[in-house]
Amino acid sequence: MLDADRIQEDLKVNRDAFACAHKWGLKVILQKPNLEGVLIRLHEGHEQSSIDPRSAERRLRRLWPAYKKGSLTADQLQQRFSLRDLQRAERHDEQLRRLLKILGL
């Protein structure tokens, strides 16, 4: 899973995630525009939100005040979101839909 808003920046410094993934037989799932954007869309009523990557973290904290970038655990995700949230959001997010299919959900 990669933040879509970082792809061009990574290419500028010769980090090509797609080439690396291909070399190792990995599938790339893009988080659009980034993880915070995906987490926003998991909140009911925000599934179709258009999210500017520069404001995504600030917007997410309005919905989830306890969110701390870089310290998110699986337990926190499980407590905050349900499979229903994922299924609702994936109707509007092709990459999330791909991930759920890969995971068999």
Image: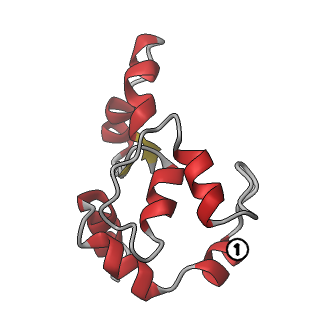
Would you identify the image quadrant in which residue 66 lies? bottom right
Which of the image's four quarters has the C terminus? bottom left
82, above or below 37, in the image: below
Say which of 18 and 4 sits in front: 4
Residue at 51% x, 51% y: name it: 35
Q: Which residue is mark 1?
A: 76
Measuring from the top left, give residue 101's x and y in whole percent. Answer: 28, 74
Label 1, secondary structure: give it. helix
Going 42% across and 34% down the picture, which residue do you hit? 5
In the foreground, 99 or 81 = 81
Q: Position of residue 22 (x, y in %)?
A: 30, 39
**Vertical arrangement, residue 16 with respect to residue 39, above or below:** above
Q: Is residue 8 left or right of residue 93?
A: right
Residue at 62% x, 79% y is 80
Q: Residues within 10 Å of mark 1 (few under 14, many from 20)?
A: few
Residue 18: give x, y in percent of width and height.
33, 35
